[in-house]
Amino acid sequence: MQVRPSEDIVIRALTGYSTRHPWKVIALWAVLGVVLSALAPTLIGRVTQNQTGDFLPKSYDSAAALAIAEEQFGVNPDATTVTMLVARSDGKALGAADQKRVEAEAAKLAQRRVIMPREDDRPKFLVPDRSQTPRIAPAMVAPDRSFELLSVELIGNRTDKGVQGVYRAFRDAARTQFSEAGMRTGFTGSLADTVDTTDSHETAAKVGGALLMGLILLINVLVFRSVLAALLPLVAVAMIIGVAGGAVAGAAILTGRKLDAGTPDLISVVLLGIGIDYLLFLLFRFREQLRARPEQSAREAAGQVSGRVGTAITSAALTIVAGFATLGVATFGQFRSLGPAIAVSVLVMLLGSLTLLPALLAAAGRKMFWPAKALGHEPDEGRAARFGARVARRPMTMTFASVALLATLAAGLIGIRMDYGQGNAAAKTPAAATATEISRALPAGVTDPTSIFVTVTDGGTLTAGRLDGLSRALAQVKGVGQVARTVLNEDHRAARIDLYPTADPQSRQARDLASGPVRAAVAQHTPAGTTAHVGGTAAIYADISTAVDHDLKIVFPVAAALIALILLLLLRSLLAPVILMLSVGLGFAATLLFQHVLGKPGVNFSLPLVLFLFVVALGTDYNILISDRIREEMQRPGPARAAVARAVQHTTPAIATAGLVLAGSFATLATTPGNEQIAFAMTLGILLSALVLSLVLVPALAALLGRSIWWPVRPRPTNGGHPQHRANAPAPEPDRVMTAD
């Protein structure tokens, strides 16, 4: 998004104040960071939503079923059900005495309050207390009496660490208690599976986080030869992320929006990447300024650099905000809530980049690059200069090579398909093993049934006999393993019929069954004077697939048009945005290659939309930085290709370093269960955006078209040029840079 002159004044006012009063600004951010970081877990817990189905518009069939379940049957929308398997330790069949013992032990557990374990020393009022007494009820006995199933209901989001701690405490207590009674136990369900998967990934998550911090430190030390320049990015961005988390939660509370449980972690990774990107942009330009103007005071240099780079950073950040604003037209609530959350967090990061980061530069001054000794003189022509000269000298070759690479990778779009499964059938966890054991004796869907909710519309009441025809018709549907008895609510004006599919309720077969034959049977055999809706996990994800398909058809064109408009305003050119959007489209398509390379069954349903916005919007950061520098260099006397070579020379270290850091940030998502696809795709997309689009394709196109790429507002060379260039203007570029292909 192009920054107008009036906005440029505001930017320079913020950066100017921050560099004149650095310690006041640093102290303010430190206080905000500590306070909001402490409050964030409590606030986030209030705005996260447990049921994915609650993100669906009420017009969808499964959403209507959820509403009936809550209103007519008292189902708690925040409840999470765990299925507990109880069997004899010696493997023998359960007898009558065994069943009584199981019921007695279950009754004891149902009367015992489970205290949430505390894993840190934070004050109690800052940590939501998830302690609770679980609701336990018998579910069914296996036909061969090899085990009995109990239904355990806990309140809270399955991704909440407090709820996970309560589950672990309950699981361990139940396991010990039944073991003393000669019984063994197993646990399955979404919460059990999440905890088992989290525990199995715990080491990988810690190692991944440590590797990311090590990567950031190592890259910065190698680039700047400075301890302070390596540590400051982590400290500064950590402060801003803490403030952003509280701001996102506060905005959600004020607007009444609910967030998906995975949104806070995604925001943290995004902010870590782009925050360090912005600081790196400032650090590279700050070092360049100090080298070019050794007589200038560090604070004056920090103010001048922050004002200049702040304009590009603001354009980049507002482009991300505008891109995610398009999610406001989505029908699926998970997308609609993600857009504002990302927008708010990026705006906080922008504010920090215009205040805290310049203040740190001003406070540290030349000590920022201690103990490096190369600050006092210009570095020799290195790889970046040679690379810039090569791009400017052979733009046609570079353009062809970039487009060919992206087009080849884009072949991954062939045969693309969506995957709406939320489970991992191949996972070797205790929860998966328990589910497999249950499925040997009972239909796989007993742990997560598809439910039919029937309500009267003629003013009468319902009886089980009135719904016998519907139950028999459902039992005849191929893929339905068992139909439970009809359950009536208190006033007999609503009924629930549970179906147990033979397929895994998380599988595509179960979704196709719920959305196809089951709904067809319900539509045909629902008694007159009643209405029926199909609910349950399988039905919910079937409807989500419909909603996502609808949103993709709307959001993609809207987002593409908005980003193209932003590029049009930013580049002030008619030709460049068209070419750039085509290349960005190829870059986006190339990121979906993993479906075939890694043998994935399909692309996670939320990935294409989120990936498009992240890769295009975040990748635009680098395009804005290189474009801004190309325009600046073209204002100097000399050939356009020489200007492109200088722009690439000066921006390659910043863009390459920032791209590697951002890609590394997204790569750590692979240690979070369920985020492997988004980690791979984001990492590849950011690397392509930074290293191919921004450093090769965009400069090559600028070298090919020269100053006409900015038509109709072409930058004209001036005798003076930029103040920094006047102070330290290099000799004109050699003629070899001007050589055509």
Image: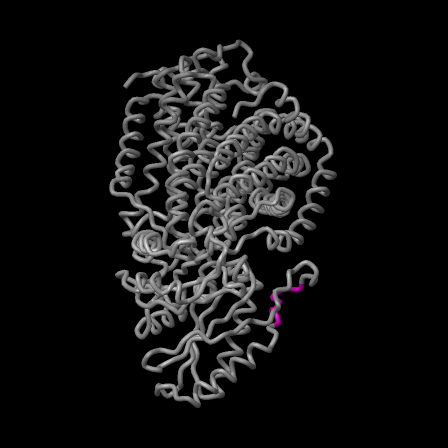
Q: Residue furthest bottom?
A: 97
Image position of 265 (left or right of 504): right
In this image, 114 relative to 182: left or right?
A: right
Query: Looking at the rendering, which quadrant does residue 125 occupy?
Result: bottom right
Q: Is residue 544 left or right of residue 278?
A: left
| Residue 162 screen position, x and y as percent | 58, 63
Q: Residue 455, relative to residue 357: is it above or below?
A: below
The quarter in which the C terminus is drawn is: top left
Q: Is residue 366 visible?
A: no
How far across and how far down the image is residue 141, in percent? 39, 78
Chief secondary structure of the magenta span? loop
Residue 298 is situated, as x and y percent measured from the top left of the image, at: 66, 31
What's the residue at 71%, 47% (across, down)? 31
In-front residue for pair 414/634 = 414
Q: Is residue 51 above or below residue 400?
A: below
For the record, the magenta segment spans 115-121
- Camera-side residue: 100 or 596? 100
In magenta segment, residue 537: no
The residue at 46%/12% (across/down) is 714
Q: How many marks?
A: 0
Q: Is residue 697 left or right of residue 633?
A: left
Residue 34, compared with residue 465, is above or below; it is above
Choose between 416 and 60: the one closer to the eye. 60
Image quadrant where residue 186 sits? bottom left
Q: Position of residue 93 (x, y in %)?
A: 35, 86
Q: Is 118 within the magenta?
A: yes
